[in-house]
Amino acid sequence: MAISSRCDTSDRSARTVTIESSHVRATATRVTRCFMSACLALLAASLGIASAQAQTSAWPQRPVRVLVPFAAGGNIDVIARLTSQRMSEVFGQQFVIENRVGGNGTIAGETAARAQPDGYTLFWAGPAVVSIFPAITKAAYDPVKDFKPISVIGVNPQALVVNAKLPIKNVADFIAYVKAQPPGLPYAGGGGPGSLSNLLMALFLKRAGLQMTSVSYRGTAPAMTDLVAGHIPTMFVPLSEALPQAQAGNIRMLGVSGEKRARQAPEVPTIAESGFPGFRGESWNGALAPAATPDEIVNRISAEFARAAKEPKFVERLDQEGVGAPVDDPDERR
């Protein structure tokens, strides 16, 4: 019995050793698997980071969409196309303009804000869609939180213009003419309530003690078409749009909204020197990106904007459009 007992003990010990050995092997296997899983996860993360960095460094690898919030042919559209053409030449990929019109420009803003932040969607903006419309309407984007500023490319004044067939030669004539008309004489409100064109006219009318009725358009380009055709008598419009029509004899410029007379039309006085001291209003054109767009991409575009602003041929093209180059400091342009 003792022998049997010892044998039983020996068997139990053997079984215990076997069990413990199996447990150790199982534990070791689990540890190995966990370690390998962690290594694989780390490797995948590293590859993902490396891939993202490689994609950022290689940007752009396909066309870049540039969302413009107003109709084709207007100031913001023309400058966006001019700048996009240069960006296409520099980066070797097409920067494609997409006019996303509606909602006083906020539809384009919402589309840009919700786009993938990969550098392939940019928002071409001005003060109306960045500061004015979001302040007076329920825009579906926050201009501060949803976007990362890239750079301003140019600034420009607007001009108070009238159809050339009207007996109006200057600001004083304009005031006398409006006062002689029945109440409710219309004016083109540019891109709608809140657009800079509309606000400048509202400010001017208030200071001049006049009452007129705003007629909204989907942008200043279609408004200018109606002005030239005589369907509407007057409006404020970016200088870049006023110059060719004035030179063609279709409209007459009465005053500019800048602090100084425009170099392209030195014979046209400022609104300030026409009896309204302190009157000033200028617009800017520039690009924004979705907020999470990599800084490397944003900085590359911003740097190219800075170089363009110092390139004589590009600056000359801006000048022809009535647009002045912005400040020299790239950080200030943001």
Image (cartoon, rainbow, N blue to C red):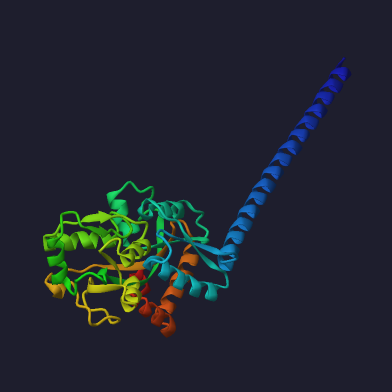
Quarter of the figure that contains the C terminus: bottom left
Question: Is any atom of residue 157 visible in this view?
Answer: yes
Q: In the image, residue 265 lies at what x, y percent?
A: 27, 80
Q: In the image, residue 221 lies at what x, y percent?
A: 37, 64
In this rendering, position of residue 197 left or right of residue 54: left
In this rendering, position of residue 66 left or right of residue 20: left
Q: Examine the image and state in which quarter residue 207 appears.
A: bottom left
Number of callouts: 0
Q: In the image, residue 210 lies at what x, y percent?
A: 14, 59
Q: Residue at x 84, y 20 (%)?
A: 8
Q: Examine the image and state in which quarter residue 49 appears.
A: bottom right
Q: Residue at x 74, y 36 (%)?
A: 26
Front residue of 325/73: it is 73
Front residue of 14/148: it is 148
Q: Residue at x 37, y 68 (%)?
A: 75
Question: Is any atom of residue 278 visible in this view?
Answer: no
Residue located farthest toward the top when viewing the structure as drawn? 1
In the depicted structure, whether residue 245 falls above or below residue 196: below
In this rendering, position of residue 328 left or right of residue 14: left
Q: Residue at x 16, y 62 (%)?
A: 178
Front residue of 319/144: it is 319
Q: In the image, residue 168 lies at what x, y percent?
A: 19, 71
Quarter of the figure that contains the N terminus: top right
